[in-house]
Every structure is written in C-alpha cells, then in structure tokens.
Amino acid sequence: MLKKVVGWTFGLFVVSIPLVQPLEFPVLGLGAQLADLIFAFTALLAVIAVLRRDLSLNWSPSYVYIFLYAGTFVLASFFADEPMRSLGRLAILLYLIAITVLTSSLSAGESRRRNIVLGLVIGTALTSLGTIVGIALFYAGLTSPDENFLLSPTGTLPAGNYPRIHSLFVNANMMCNYLNVGIVAIFLARKSGWISRNLFVVLAAGAWLAAIATLSPGIGGIVLSSGLWFWYLNRSTNRRFCAGVLYASIAAAVFFLAVTLITLDSPNTDQDFRVPVVGANVEPSVRVLVWQQALAKIYRSPILGSGPGANAADVFYVTPSGTHHLLRDGHDVWVNVAVQTGLVGVISLLMMTGFILFNYRAGPDQTDERNMYMAALKCALVGSFFYQGLTGSFEDARHLWLLFGLIIGSASPGDAEVKSQASP
C-alpha cells in the first residue's frame, strides 16, 4: 500500500515540475518550488517504504559515474573560493541525484513508466495552457511582465510588439528545455497508444506553440529530437526520405546554434565586424562575451575550478530595449561545470552522461515497448541536454535528472537491453 502511495505522490511531483510561478522561493541559492516540497514528502515516504521492505531501490552501474560526478564537487569544495556557497551547491546536487535514483527505482516496468511519461505530458499541457493565456493577455493589453507574469523579458532579442512567454517558469530558455522533454513524451504517449490521435494533435500543437513562443535557441534542440524520433520510427520503410528529414533537422539545429553566436552591432563591445555579402555590422553575442570571461576564469583554475556555485562571469550588458543586465551564469553546461569544478568535473559529467546515452541501447524493433521507450528518451536527451546544454546552463534542471532516471530505470535488470560488447 505504501509503495502505491509513493508512486502517486511521485507522479504528482512529475506533474508539478513546470509549476514554478508564483510559488518559487529561494533555498541554498536555487529557486525552490512546489515540486521540491512534494518530492521531499515523497522521499520521506520512500525511505519508510524501503525500511519496511515495501520498496526496493534499484542498483545501476550508472550510479558509479553519478557519484563520481558528485565526488568532484566534494573535492572542488575543499579548494573553493567560497566554501559555504559550495556546500549549498553540493546539497542541491545531492537532491538532484535523489531525483534520479528514485525515478530509476519507480520506472522499472511498463505501467510505472507509463505513469511518469503521462505526468510529463500533463505538465507539458499545463505549460501550453499557460502560454495560451499569456499570449491572450498580451493582446488584451497586458504587455508588461509586471502586469502579466506569464510574459518573459525579451532579453537580447530586438524590441518589438510581440510576446515572449515563459508561462509558469521564470525563464523562457528553461521552459523551452522542459518542452524538449515534454514534446518527446507526447510523441511516445501517442506511439504507445496511451493517448488518442485527436488528443495527440491538440497536445502536440499546444506544445509546439509554447516552444515557439519562448523565442529560445533551444527550439533547435526540439527540432533535432523530433527529427531523430521520426528517423527511428520510419527508417526501415523509407530510408531516403527519413534521412532527408534527419539531415534537415540537424541543419535547423545548426542554424539555431549559429544565430546565438552573433548579434547586431551595439555599444556592448567593440569586437564588431562587417558581414561581406549582407553588409551588416555584427558582433559576438552576449553568450560569447560570457564565454570569453568564463574561459579566462577556467584558465586560472583549470583542474578543480573556482568551487561549486562560483559565478562564471560578470558581464554587464544593455539589451536592445535598453534594459541593463549583469550576467553571471555560464550559458553553457560545460562552461558552468568547468568554472565550478574544472576539467575534473567536466570529465566526470561527460563520463556520466556518455554512459547513460551509449551504454543502454534501443533495439531495431520499433514494436517492442522497451526499445521504443529507450529510443524516445535518448532522442529527448540529445536535444535537451547535449544540444541545448551548448547555449544554456541546464545542469541543475529537475526534469533532466528525471530523464536520467527514466533511462536508467528502463535499463534495470530484466527490463531493458543492456549494450553488450561488440562481437567481431
């Protein structure tokens, strides 16, 4: 009975992940939210269930790499510029690891996976609903984020009479990253027969509208994940067309990545240059300016970094709308980790995520539920973590650590195919 209660409260946690506003509150330097309170209650119930032997926690070789990554944070904390801040950041990482471990243990089995995936679908639907309301309020006259909390500041985008939405999130790029996972969850739910065709069309259309409304470079990750999923499902029936779709999705992802590297000439930097054919003056984007400062900081502490929680940069930037910003985030998963924990942390994170991505395989039979499930999760991982992580610091995103746990849980003994050594 207690095991079922844990399953239900965990499902509620999954649904509540995108429900950040207006209940966010600061804890240990990271915005805590309703989902964190629900998870804390769920974790307490899970501990009691384990002690009563109603619930068993799965073991996976992936945990070796996960705790190796955590170990680099412990090591870097000893040499940190701000030790207390590093301890707070380490506590956050342990919380994220708890999400992965509990997800892994609760996702072994088709019915359990189904509940978690549908939780992501519901969360995505709520995000889409918030987007529609935000757009409607914008065109009803509530055009300022102060009046309409569903709106996001335009950031480095040109000023104009258009809405940029972060819905119930506090950041449009984080919302886009979440939708990368949510849209693939919708694809998987339809392919598995968990939702009807009509409901799929409504949910997918709403989710894509929400993604576009973020005006985030992460849209390229959603396109990439969608192209990979389409290729996986149809590559045996029409190889040439599927290859074309895959290449087009890769090209679109490259385009979205490229446009994040430059911006129109502004007073923020004198590193401008003239595009020969177009004749326009452009300059490195604010992300590039952040990366330049971050790389200098990495150079000063290349092995163990400046300590968990350390700022990657201090870039003052004036947006096209005239708003002044101080940017301290690395705007890149690997840059952020390198600043905080050095090359040791980057290598351990690469080992962890590489093991999760490549150690477990999706078989060629798309009709097999496990193969299809694993393929979908990996499509989401490529787009949300590896691609979007190039332009955003999403290493602390709850939904990504949930995704790690889903992949690990799907590969639990007896419930997934584990990659074996290649035969000659």
Image: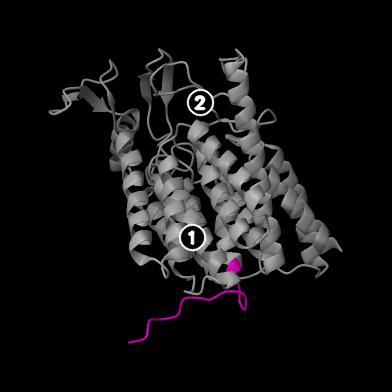
Residue 288 position, x and y percent, is 30, 33
Residue 394 badge = none
| Rendered image: mark on residue 164 | 2
Secondary structure mostly taken by the magenta-highlighted segment of the chain: loop
Is 355 situated above or below 222?
below
Q: Secondary structure at mark 2?
A: loop
Could you say which is closer to the camera, residue 251 or residue 170?
Answer: 251
Q: Is residue 184 magenta?
A: no
Query: Between 74 and 129, which is closer to the camera in this rendering?
Result: 129
Give the class, few, some or many, for how many residues have Cα within 10 Å of label 1's Cα (few <14, many ≥20).
many
Whether residue 341 is visible, yes or no, is: no
Q: Is residue 423 magenta?
A: yes
Instruction: From the top left corner, tell me how far across and down residue 175 is, in percent.
Output: 54, 37
Residue that numbered label 1 is attached to: 378
Asked which secondary structure carries label 1, the reply is: helix
Q: Residue at x 76, y 67 (%)?
A: 55
Give percent across and percent down for residue 265: 25, 20
State left or right for residue 152 relative to residue 19: left
- Residue reaching furthest right? 1
Disc 1 residue type?
A: Lys
Circle 2 crowding by C-alpha within 10 Å: few under 14, some 14–19, many from 20: many
Specify the quadrant that holds the N terminus.
bottom right
Amino acid at the residue labelled 2: Arg
Badge 2 or badge 1: first in the primary sequence: 2
Query: What residue span does the magenta drawing correspond to?
Result: 410-424
